[in-house]
Amino acid sequence: MSIFVNHLTIAKNMDKIKPGNKQALIMFIILIISVAFSSCEKYRFSPPDVDPNATWSLSNDIQPIFNSNCITCHGGAISPDLRETRSYNSLTKGEYVKTPAESSRLYTKLNAPDHQARTTPVEKLKILYWIQQGAKDN
């Protein structure tokens, strides 16, 4: 109710503003709205670049992704077992990391709509590049 009353009050008071000032007020409101929408962080964010030529390591780059995002489900009960010291054998024996990397079981599962992957686009790229580099146990 108070919002409706405030709108009526504003409408009544708009009649009291001189025509030149009314146009300036409208232009000011449009400017404020434009600035608000153009400064949103959502539209300025770009994920950091992932270098496909960097050497990707299971222990330093990939296993931390599994530890923070995957082992809640893939901690032994659901295949592949992505716990430390078990992930490499589970991925290679289960043929999850075969080339071409884009169609490997691991990468396609990470991007499947029915899979609740908690990985970011950057993490998915790291996993993709690691598979492209031969998915070494390093």
Image (tube, helix red, strand yellow):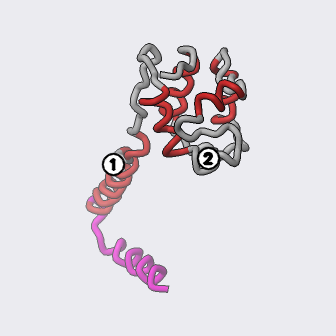
Tell how many labels. 2
Secondary element at tag 2: loop
Q: Residue at x 65, y 23 (%)?
A: 97
Q: What stretch of residues is rendered in magenta? A: 1-20
At label 1, the amino acid type is Val
Give me the disc on residue 75. Answer: 2
Q: Residue at x 28, y 56 (%)?
A: 24
The picture quadrant where one finds residue 101 is: top right
Query: Is 19 included in the stretch rendered in magenta?
Result: yes
Q: Decide if residue 67 is on the left or right side of residue 44.
A: right
Q: Decide if residue 138 is on the left or right side of residue 17.
A: right
Q: Residue at x 45, y 79 (%)?
A: 3
Query: Is 100 included in the stretch rendered in magenta?
Result: no
Name above or below for residue 102 compared with residue 116: above
Image location of residue 107, percent across then percent down:
64, 29
Residue, disc 1 = 35
